[in-house]
Image (cartoon, rainbow, N blue to C red):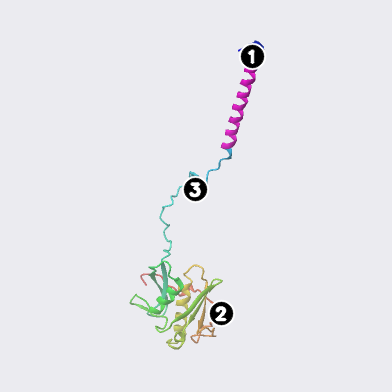
Amino acid sequence: MALWAGMGPINMRKKVAVTFLVLFMVGVCLGAAREWLSERTVVPPSEQVHEPSPTETSPKSAPPPSGTIDTNTVTVYFSDGEAMYLRPEQRIADDSKVDRVEMVIGELIRGPQTENLVKTVPPNARLRQVWVDGGVAYVDFSREFQTEHWGGSTGDTFTLFSVVNSLTELPGINAVQFLVEGEVEEAILGHTDTTEPISRREDLINRDPDY
């Protein structure tokens, strides 16, 4: 008590003022620190909420537009009974991992399911190997593809283009290079040049269901 009494009222007021000023500055510093920390906080991407703009009106669950091709469906082409056109048939791939190129060739060898369509690939032909490079499908058949073919220029055309038109239905394939037993030949079936990749021919296709 003697010490405080000796300080006098002026010293007492100074001490209170200094204490108040210190507390005030501490409060200001704490507030500034909270502001700075709040501005540095980043919301993780997984927690960010995206509100669709007025132009984003289509929900993610909307059905695909009409005409969209089912990725599990492949199209294969067979000759009609008059050997005038190639006609399409659909096949469903039950296994999503199945190689679509091998599936197409396998279905062509098995033949059509529609009664008035005609097989285009000899039934004993075997696919030795196939690969795709630069938009070209390289299809290597066993010798039976050539030796057991029924011949003729029309048969040649419809066999080759049933393969070409079927494979070019698949994404990433624009042409087909034919091989027999690993070799490229001048005319595998006797008429059409097969030394270079063969491109699709739309003019051979008839999709009219009433035809």
Residue 152 drawn at (x, y percent): 45, 87
Tell whether position 32 is magenta: yes
Residue 196: numbered disc:
2
Residue 206 drawn at (x, y percent): 42, 72
Residue 46: numbered disc:
3
Quadrant of the rendering where the N terminus is positioned: top right
Tell me the element at label 3: helix
Q: Which residue is mark 1?
A: 3
Q: Main secondary structure of the magenta part?
A: helix
From the viewer's side, name the closer residue of 100 and 64: 100
Task: State yes or no: discs 2 and 3 in contact (Cβ < 8 Å).
Answer: no
Tell whether position 53 is magenta: no
Question: Residue at coordinates 57% horizontally, 33% vertically from top-left?
Answer: 34
Give the alpha-carbon distance from disc 2 to disc 3, as whole Å. Answer: 52 Å
Question: Residue at coordinates 56% horizontally, 40% vertically from top-left?
Answer: 41
Task: Please state the extent of the stretch shown in magenta in the rendering.
Answer: 15-38
Question: Residue at coordinates 60% horizontally, 33% vertically from top-left?
Answer: 33
The disc labelled 3 sits on which kind of residue? Answer: Ser
The disc labelled 1 sits on which kind of residue? Answer: Leu
Tell me the element at label 1: helix
Q: Decide which of tag 2 and tag 3 comes sooner along the chain.
A: 3
Give the alpha-carbon distance from disc 1 to disc 2, as whole Å. Answer: 111 Å
From the viewer's side, name the closer residue of 118 and 176: 176
Give the number of the mark in front: 2 or 3: 3
> Counting other residues with Cα less than 10 Å from the Cα at mark 1, is it few (<14), some (14-19), or many (20 or more)?
few
Residue 53 drawn at (x, y percent): 49, 44
Residue 2 drawn at (x, y percent): 63, 12
Quadrant of the rendering where the C terminus is positioned: bottom left
